[in-house]
Image (cartoon, rainbow, N blue to C red):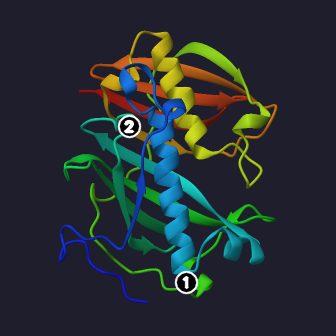
Amino acid sequence: MRFQPYDKVIDTFPYEIHFTPRTYECGPGGYMKPHSLMQQIQEAAAKHAEVLGVGMDWMRRNGTMWALLNFRIHIDVLPLWEKEITLFTWPSGHDGMIAFREFSGRDEDGRELFKASSDWIVLDVKRKMPVLLKDLKVAIPDSGKRIFGKLMRLKEAPGYEGIHAISVGRGSIDMNGHVNNTEYIRWGIDALSRIGTAPEGISSMRITYSQEVFEKDDIDIGHVLVDPTHHLRGVRKDRTVFVMECDQG
């Protein structure tokens, strides 16, 4: 399978979906909630993976699943209620065990509202070990245009202070039996709201995922401001499960 390079056709990407933010996906002012936007981004990635032959059904038959490692998004403006968004996504190469994927969202006038990059691995479900992408024997492109270049694993900042604790409920669990990656975004944004930071003012987010989380787990959310960046982390039994950074525009 051949993939259309982003740098040769600026306005045409390999795959696109259209969505219109619904009432329950939006907060005050009609702006889409960041974790709801992340859900649409994940849905686009899942649908494109199906088209490319490496979707959830194929993964399940082979005892594997996609897992998100790193994610970075820059937001000029959050999507608004009832305004159609075109979301583009394309694979942008791989490096051994890590596959790269990009995203760009535009409004009805063609203005880019947000752009994002992500790193994914394929996990053997039983062994909980990464799988070499070359062993999948599918057409994952070797290279492609990346929006932010290489994503780095986030490091913990010093001096986190506890914000609140979360007891994971059934509603956070996805089809793979663990907490969906979009929930980590929601937890981080909710923690920021507790200290007076409105999600509508966030211009960028970066998150690194370290551990799976399951129903009935207890997660302690910590925060520290290293001006101008808000640093957050989630901890389960003294083990960090995610690290997140947010900036305000």
Check the picture and name the quadrant holding the N terminus.
bottom left
The answer to which of 106 and 136 lies nearer the viewer is 106
Callout 1: 10 Å neighbours few (<14), some, many (20+)? Answer: few
Looking at the picture, tell me which residue is in the foreground, 80 or 98.
Answer: 80
Query: Which of the two marks, 2 or 1, is nearer to us in this view?
Result: 2
The structure residue drawn at horizontal position 30% and vertical position 74%, both measured from the top left corner, is: 144
Residue shown at 77% from the left, 50% from the top:
177
Secondary structure under the numbered disc 1 in the rendered image: helix
> Which residue matches tag 2?
205
Secondary element type, mark 2? strand
Q: Residue at x 69, y 22 (%)?
A: 166
Q: Is residue 41 above or below residue 207?
A: below
Quarter of the picture containing the C terminus is: top left
Horizontal relation, residue 223 to residue 107: left or right:
right
Mark 2 to mark 1: distance in Å?
A: 31 Å
Where in the figure is residue 213, as x and y percent of width and height?
71, 41
x and y, in percent, of residue 156 in the image: 47, 32
Tag on residue 134?
Answer: 1
- Mark toward the start of the polypeptide (2 vs 1): 1
Q: Residue at x 35, y 82 (%)?
A: 3
Q: Is residue 55 visible?
A: yes
Q: Quadrant of residue 103?
A: bottom left
The numbered mark at residue 126 is none
Measured as percent of width and height from the top left, residue 41 is found at 46, 52
Residue 79: x and y, percent? Answer: 34, 38
Quarter of the figure with residue 247 = top left
| Crowd tier of the residue under label 2, counting other residues whose Cα lies within 10 Å: few below 14, some 14–19, many 20 or above | many
Which residue type carries mark 2? Met
Q: What's the residue type where badge 1 is placed?
A: Lys
Tell me: 20 left or right of 124.
left
Asked which quadrant contains residue 18, the reply is bottom left
